[in-house]
Image: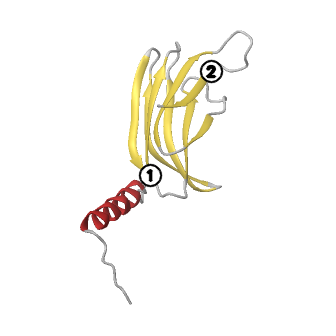
């Protein structure tokens, strides 16, 4: 029986590949959101994690004045928990907050004044950075 040994270069390449794969799989995903409020009204922005259907935990929050930008995060959350960016009106307690589910990474939320044809006081767009 002939025994062939692996070359040192092969072993280094396999080790680097394994390190890259394992290093890329973070145990705790990180989330961050830049909130750009281009509207004329202040809003409350919250970064929430939801471990169950009836439970939510605020990771970060900020009042975002009209024509200003606020950064939420970065914050870590367990891999199987859902994470949402929630936008609430500060001057209308009867309006429902808007929730948008996000995945790990950096996101940008842009808030603008609602159009004359919309029911809401503002419009929200969410995009991956």
Q: Name the residue nearer the viewer: 116 or 4.
A: 4
Measuring 51% from the left and 28% from the top, which residue is drawn there?
109
The residue furthest bottom is: 1
Disc ID at residue 29: 1
- Rendered location of residue 116, percent (x, y): 71, 9
- Rendered location of residue 43, percent (x, y): 51, 25
Measuring 25% from the left and 68% from the top, which residue is drawn there?
8
Q: Secondary structure at mark 1?
A: loop
Relative horizontal placement of residue 56, taking residue 11 as reference (left or right): right
- The quarter of the picture where the N terminus appears is bottom left
Query: Is the Cβ of the residue at disc 1 closer than 8 Å to that at disc 2?
Result: no
Measuring 37% from the left and 63% from the top, which residue is drawn there?
18
Where is 16 relative to 87, above or below?
A: below
Q: Earlier in the sequence, mark 1 or mark 2?
A: 1
CA distance separating discs 1 and 2: 28 Å
What is the quadrant of residue 68 in the picture? top left
The residue furthest front is: 2
Tag 2 residue: 123
The crowding category of the residue bearing disc 1, from other C-alpha atoms within 10 Å (few below 14, some 14 to 19, many at least 20), is: some
Relative horizontal placement of residue 29, taking residue 123 as reference (left or right): left
């Amino acid at each position: 029986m002939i025994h062939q040994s692996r070359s040192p270069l092969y072993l280094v390449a396999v080790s680097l590949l394994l390190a890259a794969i394992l290093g890329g799989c973070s145990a705790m995903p990180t989330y961050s959101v830049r909130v750009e409020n281009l509207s004329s009204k202040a809003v409350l922005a919250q970064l929430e994690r939801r471990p169950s259907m009836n439970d939510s935990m605020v990771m970060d929050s900020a009042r975002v004045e009209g024509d200003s930008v606020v950064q939420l995060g970065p914050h870590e959350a367990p891999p199987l928990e859902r994470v949402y960016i929630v936008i609430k009106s500060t001057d209308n307690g009867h309006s429902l907050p808007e929730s948008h589910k996000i995945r790990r990474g950096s996101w940008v939320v842009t808030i603008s004044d609602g159009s004359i044809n919309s029911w809401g006081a503002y419009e929200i767009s969410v995009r991956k950075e």
